[in-house]
Image: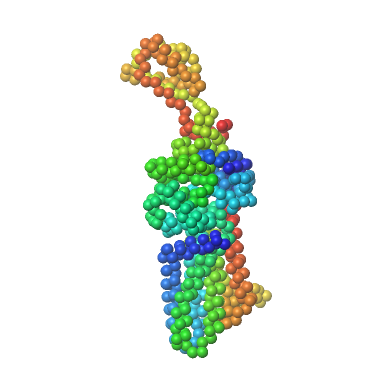
Amino acid sequence: MIKVQDLSKDYGDVQAVKSIDFEIDDGEIVGFLGENGAGKTTTLKMLTGYLVPTAGNVEINDLNINDNALEIQKQIGYLPELNPLYPEMSVYEYLEFIARVRNIIGKNFREALSRVVDRCGLQGVVHKQVSSCSKGYKQRIGLAGSMIHDPKILILDEPVTGLDPNQIVEIRELIKSLGREKLVLMSSHILQEIQVTVDRIMIIHQGEIVANGTNEELMSSFKGNTILNLEVRNANDNSLKDLSIAIPNIDVANIEQKKDYHIIQLEYDQKVDPREDLFNYAVSSGWVILKMTPTTTDLEDVFRKLTMEGKADA
Amino acid sequence: MHNTRSIFQREIRGFFNSPMAYIFLVIFSVFNGYFFTSTFFLYNQSDLRSLFSIVPMVYLIFVPAISMGLIARENNIGTMETIATLPIKTHEFVLGKYFAAVVLILLGLLATIIHFITLVKFGTKIDYGALFTGYIGLALVGSMYASIGIFASSITDNQVVAFIIGIFIVLVFFLMGFFLPLVPANLAGIVQYISVDYHYSNISRGVIDSRNIVYFLSVIGFFLIMTVQSLESRRWS
């Protein structure tokens, strides 16, 4: 369990993280979403004891990072941003080194090794040099190193950045399967990535957490308007003009005359659904509906809105 | 302690997995061999004095060169973050790195044993005691320069910068003795005490005085503590 209270970090005059609070329970996969420079990495560096907070409190499994950094570091696994590795070592040597530091030797190491090799799909590269592995493999080597001691908590900073689509899917599946037994906190600046991988999303913007909730919770709290595109044939000017009078709660945003049909763009609150009324109106006015496509706000709009406008309540 | 050993082993392996250690050992031996043998047979003396005076000068370049990457490279490739978030205390990390550099220097010294064999073969009335303390002195000077090198390596993530800073600090200690005639009399004692040469020449003459040993150990201790401090201070940046 991770508990963060009033956590702040200043770099000189720049406030990178501004008094943030959050909690993560065991078994959750939480995504930390924000633009580059929003404060994600700084926060993760404070959670893992790499940076000392300017103010505030981090508690991991009831241990305080200021007093028990070493004990916390024993219990967590951390994959830093850009996944630093020693290029001249073999994969085996690297994992052996990490394991040794974590006091996993002999039979325990052999067990741990076969577990992470299996889990991260490293079978083919164990005795290869790290520098000769592909980027996707390097990422898995980094992950394997961070979980060699089977930690209950995994903190992954941008684990899929720079991978190709197939590799992204593989790492994503790996993280999801890890999340069944561990607390996973992963950061990303790619919304789609976070959305499909995690249970809960925290959006950080300019050092503040501006939203925190599940995909659905975030969407419902930010419901904007639905935009509906309607293509109709046989519409005359009068019936078009009367449309907004006949159906309440809609705005006619745009009407475009095409060769033998009209494209009407309507906007209405997401809480109402005027499609049935529209259909009836079309029938009574003699329109032929060719197409009716509503587009609702998605998380991307929410994200954009939050990070453009600043803090909002979630 | 096992962390220090893990760091040490990784570093030694790193030295020998890359051309680094081999280049160092070969060039170090060739340098010393050339300067030693070019005068050894001329002087017609049964000692290694010319070796003992040349090695500290060869050190001036070589020790900063082997220690420049110790920490700067970890900063540069980002593995410092991995290390710093593993359950390793900063001083364990620094000691592991430091011992690796010292061992490489001692291996370099070991290669000069060939000159010792030459001496035993051709020389007469050899003063084995002075030879022994001479090697002790070389080991101490090398270890001291390595502590300066690792400190220089800890304050930057650029190995070339670390190398230059390392040479600069080492030179300050090395040249101190030469400036002795230029400094005011009341400072002379201090300057003399700081100078490496003053302590080293005592030892290599065959006198092992605790004051000289204390000097080397305290300089080494000072720079290792500074290294730990400089790494710790990064966490607060």
Q: Is residue B187 left or right of residue A97?
A: right
The image shows residue A239, relative to residue B58, as above or below, that is: above
Q: Provide residue A238's location: percent of width, then percent of height.
A: 40, 11
The image shows residue A190, relative to residue A245, as above or below, that is: below
Q: Provide residue A182's location: percent of width, then percent of height.
A: 52, 43
Query: What residue sits 56% from the left and 73% below the top?
Result: B140
Q: Quarter of the image for the C terminus of chain A: give it.
A: top right
The image shows residue B139, relative to residue B86, as above or below, that is: below
Q: Provide residue A199's location: percent of width, then percent of height.
A: 50, 36
Query: What residue sits 41% from the left and 43% below the top?
Result: A170
Q: Can residue A278 be spotted in the picture?
A: yes
Pick the front one: B191 or B232 = B232
Locate residue B93: give its quadrant.
bottom right
Pick the front one: A209 or B18 = B18
Query: What residue sits 51% from the left and 56% below the top?
Result: A104
Q: Can residue B183 be spotted in the picture?
A: no
Q: How is the image coloured?
A: rainbow
Pick the front one: B209 or A142 = A142
The image shows residue A234, relative to residue A80, as above or below, that is: above
The residue most toward the front is A107
Q: Quarter of the image for the N terminus of chain A: give it.
A: top right
Query: What residue sits 56% from the left and 63% below the top?
Result: B95
